[in-house]
């Protein structure tokens, strides 16, 4: 069995023995043959994206083809997810040592997933009556003949001790995101879905800055709450001490953690969020500069103009002029924070 570690673009075989078992999570993608390795790249990309967003775990994807070698004992499969990577054209047929190998994997892995034609592994192992599974229309008749019950959906979360299933490889990614939600929370799962394109991003107030910072902080819950609170208080900015109280920490700890997680200072970020909102209002509304200054917490249009020029190296009226001349008015900050 060859092992491939995320983050290596050439997928070079490596020693995948974990140095920190509690933080290293293995995903075993079981292929019908060597030619299927390219199709499993989507699973590798999924967990590569998750690794960029999560802080306290590292996921490793292992690609393997069943052989006559033992599947490994209970200690090997403890904590590992096994994905039987089928397609939409072929039913999996197992016999001899491959049948024994698959039975061991399903019995020992705490979380196993059958994709596409791999659902027929259950019939080969006489486990078809254990649970209803996700069946693609291509396999509907064959599934009926083999005693496999369809759940009527594209994915199926099974009860403990049974295999989960996905009708297609794309729906398998949706199922994997459900496991991310179970293991790490719904917010991280939603962030991951948006990050890899499984769903449309739903960022609060459409703040690009907040989105970048959440990603930079790898979905940290404290950073998320802080940014949401600041975005909810753009018109009437709150004091940092009050902000710290809202997220249930001390002012000093909040400032330290925010800088550590995002690489930016808290007060500077708060001001930049207000300027970003002002920029958006200049581009997308007919509000006057006085109204915009009030809506973004500046004491006057003069104060707004001064801060705007310092950050964007242009004046607010120039953004409005560009809008009326058919330009998008998109700007980069004068001083980047990354």
Image (cartoon, rainbow, N blue to C red):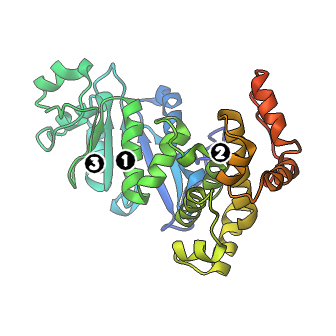
Q: CA distance from mark 3 to mark 2?
A: 43 Å
Q: Nearer the viewer, mark 1 or mark 2?
A: 2
Residue displayed at 40% across by 44% down: 176
Query: Within 10 angstroms of label 3, few (less than 14), some, or many (20 or more) residues?
Result: many
Q: CA distance from mark 1 to mark 2?
A: 26 Å
User: Residue 53 location, x and y as percent?
Assistant: 57, 53
The residue to which callout 2 is attached is: 208
Q: Are marks 3 and 2 in contact (CB under 8 Å)?
A: no
Q: Earlier in the sequence, mark 3 or mark 1?
A: 3
SS type, badge 1: helix
Please state which of residues 187 and 291 is positioned toward the viewer in this rendering: 291
Q: Are marks 1 and 2 in contact (CB under 8 Å)?
A: no
Query: Within 10 angstroms of label 2, few (less than 14), some, or many (20 or more) residues?
Result: few
Q: Nearer the viewer, mark 3 or mark 1?
A: 1
Determine whether, in the image, residue 81 is placed left or right of residue 227. left
Determine whether, in the image, residue 96 is placed left or right of residue 14. left
SS type, badge 2: helix
Q: CA distance from mark 3 to mark 1?
A: 20 Å
Determine whether, in the image, residue 195 is placed left or right of residue 336. left
Residue displayed at 30% across by 27% down: 117
User: Residue 317 location, x and y as percent?
Assistant: 82, 37
Please state which of residues 54 and 332 is positioned toward the viewer in this rendering: 332
The residue to which callout 3 is attached is: 106
Visible residue check, residue 126: yes
Count how many numbered circles sit on residues in the image: 3
Q: Earlier in the sequence, mark 1 or mark 2?
A: 1
Query: Within 10 angstroms of label 1, few (less than 14), some, or many (20 or more) residues?
Result: some
The residue to which callout 1 is attached is: 178
Q: Are marks 3 and 1 in contact (CB under 8 Å)?
A: no
User: Residue 111 location, x and y as percent?
Assistant: 32, 52
Q: Nearer the viewer, mark 3 or mark 2?
A: 2
Determine whether, in the image, residue 321 is placed left or right of residue 89. right
């Amino acid at each position: 069995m060859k092992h491939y570690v995320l983050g290596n673009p050439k997928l070079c075989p490596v020693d995948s023995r974990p140095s920190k078992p509690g933080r290293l999570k293995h995903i075993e993608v079981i292929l019908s043959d060597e030619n299927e390795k390219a199709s499993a790249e989507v699973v590798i990309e999924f967990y590569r994206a998750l690794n960029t967003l999560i802080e306290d775990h590292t996921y490793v994807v292992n690609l393997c083809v069943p052989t006559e070698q033992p599947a490994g004992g209970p200690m090997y499969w403890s904590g590992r997810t096994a994905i039987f990577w089928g397609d939409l054209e072929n039913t999996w047929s197992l016999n001899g040592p491959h049948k024994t190998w698959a039975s061991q994997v399903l019995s020992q892995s705490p979380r196993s997933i059958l994709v596409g034609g791999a659902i027929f592994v259950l019939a080969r192992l006489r486990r078809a009556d254990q649970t209803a599974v996700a069946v693609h229309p291509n396999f509907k008749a064959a599934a009926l003949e083999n005693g496999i019950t369809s759940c009527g959906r594209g994915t199926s979360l099974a009860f403990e001790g049974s295999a989960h299933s996905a009708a297609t490889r794309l729906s398998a990614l949706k199922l994997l995101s459900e496991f991310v939600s179970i293991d790490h929370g719904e917010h991280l799962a939603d962030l991951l879905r948006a990050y890899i394109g499984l769903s449309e991003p739903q960022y609060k107030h459409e703040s690009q800055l907040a989105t970048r910072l959440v990603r930079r902080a790898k979905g940290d819950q404290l950073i998320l709450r802080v940014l949401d609170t600041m975005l909810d208080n753009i018109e009437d900015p709150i004091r940092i001490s009050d902000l710290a109280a809202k997220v249930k920490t001390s002012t000093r700890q909040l400032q330290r953690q925010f800088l550590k997680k995002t690489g930016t200072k808290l007060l500077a970020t708060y001001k930049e969020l207000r300027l970003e909102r002002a920029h958006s209002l200049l581009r997308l509304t007919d509000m006057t500069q006085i109204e915009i200054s009030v809506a973004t917490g500046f004491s006057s249009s003069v104060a707004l103009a001064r801060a705007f020029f310092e950050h964007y190296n242009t004046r607010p009226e120039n953004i409005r002029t560009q809008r009326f001349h058919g330009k998008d008015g998109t700007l980069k900050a004068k001083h980047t924070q990354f």
